[in-house]
Amino acid sequence: MITSSEFEGHRLTDEEVLAFVRLLFPAGSDTTYLALGSMMNHVLGDPELKARLLADPALVPKVVDECLRLYSTTAMMPRYTETGMDYEGAHIPPNSWVMFGIRTANRDPSVFEDPDRFDAARSQRKSLAFSVGSHACLGMHLARAEMQVSLELLLKRLPGLRLRDGRVPMTQVNLRGVRALPVRFDDVLPA
Ligand code: HEM
């Protein structure tokens, strides 16, 4: 349907459709599995939080959003400006590249009180985990749903799920997360 539609007289070429599908692999899968890893790293490293989640699944969406803010998988994104601007004392000339820091913004103390602290009750209205504006994440609702379902099922179906060696450090500036998360569990319960 989308591939055969026209917008302002333009129809997507096969090359454009293929480029979009190629974009969906890093944009849709790397981001989600890395964010899931960062979240499990946090949750399993805090047995009290894990117990609260098991007792009250209504907490799951809040924990997902707070982990997305705190560990921002897409830590930095580039933009190109044709016009340039002055911003908070910095001169950005026309026709230049700018990197904006999503992770830094998500830990800005003037926006989030005590920003390095995990707080599932805080408002996420200003979280930039999925960016804002015309290029905001197309898959944000899917990503949240995937993370919520995964968190709930992993805790429910793998009794005794725990970190094998404690929390693992995250790596890389962009597509940031844990590359491997060794865990142990005692059983696998049926669906
Ligand atoms: C936790 C998982 C995810 C995170 C943290 C994330 C984050 C982001 C961010 C920050 C942007 C904005 C990029 C920019 O401003 O230049 C973005 C764009 C995008 N995301 Fe995601 N994303 C996630 C999952 C997904 C999924 C599951 C899909 C699709 C299946 C997806 C598809 C896209 C696409 C197509 C764009 C480009 C939108 C545009 O430029 O108009 N993302 N994502």
Image (cartoon, rainbow, N blue to C red):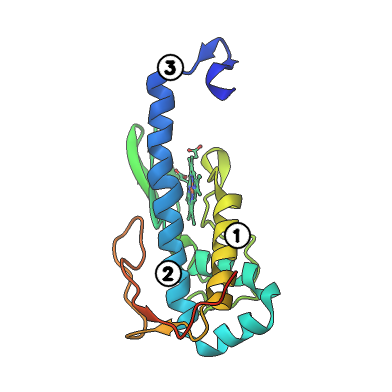
The residue lying toward the viewer, choosing from 93 and 10, is: 10
The mark nearer the N terminus, 2 or 3, is 3
Could you say which disc has been placed on residue 189 in the image? none
Considering every residue shown, the one lying at the far front of the view is 190
Amino acid tagged 2: Ser
Q: The C terminus lies in which quarter of the figure? A: bottom right
The mark nearer the N terminus, 1 or 2, is 2
How many residues crowd around disc 2 within 10 Å: few (fewer than 14), some, or many (20 or more)?
Answer: many
Q: Is residue 143 above or below residue 158?
A: above
* Residue that appears at 57% across and 70% down: 153
Considering every residue shown, the one lying at the far top of the view is 9
Secondary structure beneath dot 2 equals: helix
Q: Which residue is mark 2?
A: 38
The residue lying toward the viewer, choosing from 156 and 101, is: 156
Secondary structure beneath dot 3 equals: loop
* Residue that appears at 51% across and 74% down: 115
Could you say which disc has been placed on residue 126 in the image? 1
Could you say which disc has been placed on residue 13 in the image? 3
Q: Is residue 171 above or below residue 74?
A: below
Secondary structure beneath dot 1 equals: loop
Spatial CA span between label 2 and label 3: 37 Å
